[in-house]
Every structure is written in structure tokens, then in C-alpha cells.
Image (tube, rainbow, N blue to C red):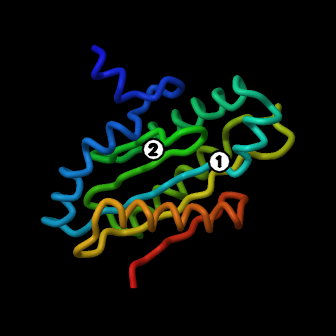
Amino acid sequence: MLESTTYRDAVTGLHNLRYLEARWPMLLAQAIDHPSLCVLHLGVDQSTYLRDVMGEAKSNDCSVRIAKVLQDTLPEGAELIAGGQLVFKLILPASSADLANVLIEQIQHQLALLDFSDLPEALTLSMGGTIYQQGDTVDVLQLRADLALYLAMRHGAGAVVWEMAV
């Protein structure tokens, strides 16, 4: 029981970063055998405003609602991780950038259907992604996805940026 709760995010109920850390060796082994692993990091563009101005309850409500959309669009075999306040990580084994882009469109469409009329502006989710390259380590994959998310959030308004290894 204690072990299962240490692998879950208290707000969303999704798996947390500790769970992902335990799963990475298997995910990376799959990617080495079948080089097609996509890593997406997703962040709410208005996260600071939600937390600092609207408050923890509103921030948590938005996290739960976004997590539900992500769970509903999640393809089989994908890993969805709560990465902290209004940040999510999506690991897509056996996936390409093209398949991930279709999923991104579905996620953005479903988010647009949510009623966030109690917020001063539309809620948007920016995304940064990368694709496994032969020889990548977990740290490299996560660093590239983090960089892509950072660049996407600088654009804001639900931007999507792909970081590809050169």
C-alpha cells in the first residue's frame, strides 16, 4: 500500500516522477530494440498565475481536469506522469513524431472544449517533445524534452516545439 501511494501524485492520482524513474530502464530498453520512443513534456502556460493569483484550489482543479483529458486521449502502452504543479510527461513507446502530432491535436481539441470561463483567459497547454535517437540516455531525452517545453512556453498559447538531436 505505501509503495503504491509513493508512485502516485496526490492531486491528480496519476503516476508521479518516482514511478517514471523506476520505469525508465524498461522504456529505454524497448526504444533500443525498436527505435521509436517519443517523449512529450506538457505545461500549462498560465501555471504561475493559477497558483499565485487564483490559488491552490483552482490550480489543483485545473490539474485534475487536464489530467482527465490526457487520460481520455492516451493511446495504449503510453505512460502519463504528473510532473509537478500543472506539468505532465507523456512517454509514447513505439510512436513517431507524426503519431504524436495527431495525439497533440486531439489533446488540444479536447482541452478547448473544457469550460474554464471562471478564468480570466483561455487555458492553454504548451508541449515540448523529442524522439529517441540511437545512443540516447534517459537524461538526454528528458533534457531535450524539457528544452523543447521551455521554448514552447516562451511562445505560449498552446505552442508545440520539437527538439531533435543533431
Left or right of residue 31, residue 48 in this image: right
Mark 2 sits on what residue? Answer: 73
Mark 1 sits on what residue? Answer: 44
Where residue 126 appears, as percent x and y from the top left, is 62, 57
Residue at the farthest front position: 139
Left or right of residue 85, residue 92 in this image: left
Residue at the farthest right position: 120
Query: Residue drawn at (54%, 49%), measured in percent from left and top?
Result: 107
Left or right of residue 69, residue 49 in this image: right
Three-letter amino acid code of the residue under disc 1: Val
Where residue 56 appears, as percent x and y from the top left, is 70, 26
Query: Residue drawn at (83%, 45%), measured in percent from left and top?
Result: 121
Left or right of residue 145, residue 111 in this image: right
Q: Are marks 1 and 2 in contact (CB under 8 Å)?
A: no
Q: Quadrant of the C terminus?
A: bottom left
Above or below, 132 against 19 in this view is below
Q: Earlier in the sequence, mark 1 or mark 2?
A: 1
Three-letter amino acid code of the residue under disc 2: Thr
User: Which structural element holds mark 1?
Assistant: strand
Crowd around label 1: few <14 · some 14–19 · many ≥20 (10 Å): many
